[in-house]
Amino acid sequence: MKSTALVLLMILAPSVAFAQTGQEHDPASTPLSPSSPSVEPGTNAPAQGTLPGTVAQSPTTDYARFEALRPKGWDIPFPRIQDTIAQDAGGVRSALADAGIGIMGLSANTGVYNLRGDSTPGASYNGRKPTYEVGIQCIFLSFDTGKIGLEGGQFLVTAASVTNGLRQIDGPRFTRITNLAYYQALAHGHVEVKVGYLDNLQEFVGTAVAGSLASGNLGPQAQIPVQLGFGYNGIGAPAINVRLNASNGLYTKFGAQRSLPPGGANAEVPLNGGLGLRFNLPGARALFVDEVGLHREAEAGQRSLWFRAGVIYNTTRFTNYKTGGTSENYALYAAVDRQLTQTDKDRPFRGVYLGASVNYAPSSRNLYSQYYEARVYGIGLIKKRPFDLASIVASYNKLSNFALDAIVPNQKSQDYAASVVASYAYRVTHGLYLQPGLGLVKNPTYAPKVPLAVNGYLSLSLLI
């Protein structure tokens, strides 16, 4: 009971404190720098990911010059330097920008606890005991190749340290290079090419609620793209991505990647230790992905819309649980996010949004075979807090009976998992987000059978 009360206090106390003190200032203008393409790459995401920060600490800092230095090519826009804790303190970032160098740090941490408690023998899942579920610490370094005559180009290096609380469930703990890549925009941004070691879950699908790197991770439970061998959460792999952007918001993006081995990070990290830059790995073959979509940014009089759908095909041989042999693998996905209301003409991203996602993979080759998600979220619902994000996310995962019979033979297993998670992300100040949440989870583990979990979540994200 004492631990339950403590977790409840951790979740509820910030709500009271920041409701009283968390007033925001107007954002500073952050137009694209003159060297940026006329169609900004990487903005095919709902509004939260594109929000600027608060007024700059130094009125003499030209934050627009940092725009060309943000990492490019993601499916969500990278946060702006204005929305960091350090901003341009001491003029350090300005000095680096003079040399074409951009830098940002990210710390994202999530804890969870089943407030009901659970004493089921043999059960292991996130939240059964107070769990530090995942912590990701990253540093992003970019170089604008316009400084050496290659306009529209960028070198990117990302290093990540990942701490998973339950290694047998969430994956290993490691520190490695996540991205080592070159990006080039062509034809005024209508063509984008990115090649190198890439974390492709940041490049396709769009799983973060409201497209927010800092506050959009509580709720979604999609496992299928990761299961298919995408690079994810600090695990990069050799890849090349090409995106074509039409002027009306239509786009298509194709990628070819060396797959992660079957088993994901648990298989990858032991085979690819050190910096994580081995090109070939035993059993890992080529993966292909193609996504088509329509994205229109929120503007005065125009509500945001982002539709995307894609297919992933992996030539790696996966266990075929139905036949006992091996087979190549594939998955299909589709998602849509639509802004329903627009409450502020000066900040058109503010309002209520509705979204849904569907994923499918064949049950003969995958533990997770179907995924359905519905979400409703609001940006800036409180008048004086225009950058807060409130969300409710409902998800359903269908598990393969073929896979369950092979993984947990002779055990009574659960062939689905369902959850509803409500959360509120407080933008405490520029670069600091605190997000408490509460969720109901049916079948948090597929074996053994456990009671309905009532999870308390707490996420802390810092942009530095």
Image: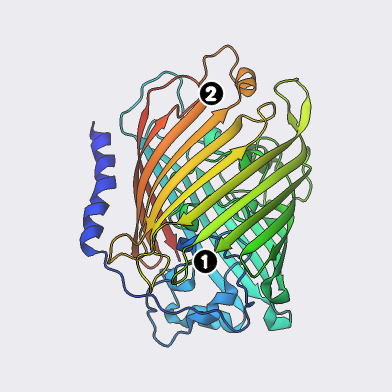
Residue 25 seen? yes
Q: Is mark 2 on a helix, strand or loop?
A: loop
In this picture, residue 102 sits left or right of residue 89:
right
Question: Is 398 situated above or below 230?
Answer: above
86 to the left or right of 403? left
- The residue identified by callout 1 is 297
Q: Residue at x 42, y 78 (%)?
A: 89
Above or below, comparing residue 102 to residue 98 in the picture: above
Quadrant in which the N terminus appears: top left
Q: In which quarter of the image is the C terminus?
A: bottom left
Q: Where is residue 454 in the image (x, y as percent from the top left)?
A: 34, 33
Left or right of residue 142, residue 317 in this image: right
Q: What's under tag 2, amino acid-wise?
A: Asp
- Camera-side residue: 182 or 189? 189
Say whether residue 213 is visible. no
Q: Which residue lies furthest to the front in this view?
A: 301
Q: Give whichever of discs 2 and 1 has the lower sequence position.
A: 1
Q: Picture coordinates of residue 262 (x, y %)?
A: 70, 35
For the residues labelled 2 and 1, say whether their Cβ atoms are less than 8 Å apart. no
Task: Locate residue 430, reporting x and y percent.
Answer: 38, 68
Residue at image position (37%, 30%) is 453
Residue at the limit of the structure toward the top, as seen here: 410
The three-letter amino acid code for the residue at tag 1 is Glu
For the image shown, how many numbered marks are present on the structure? 2
Residue marked by disc 2: 415
Gap between marks 2 and 1, in whole Å? 39 Å
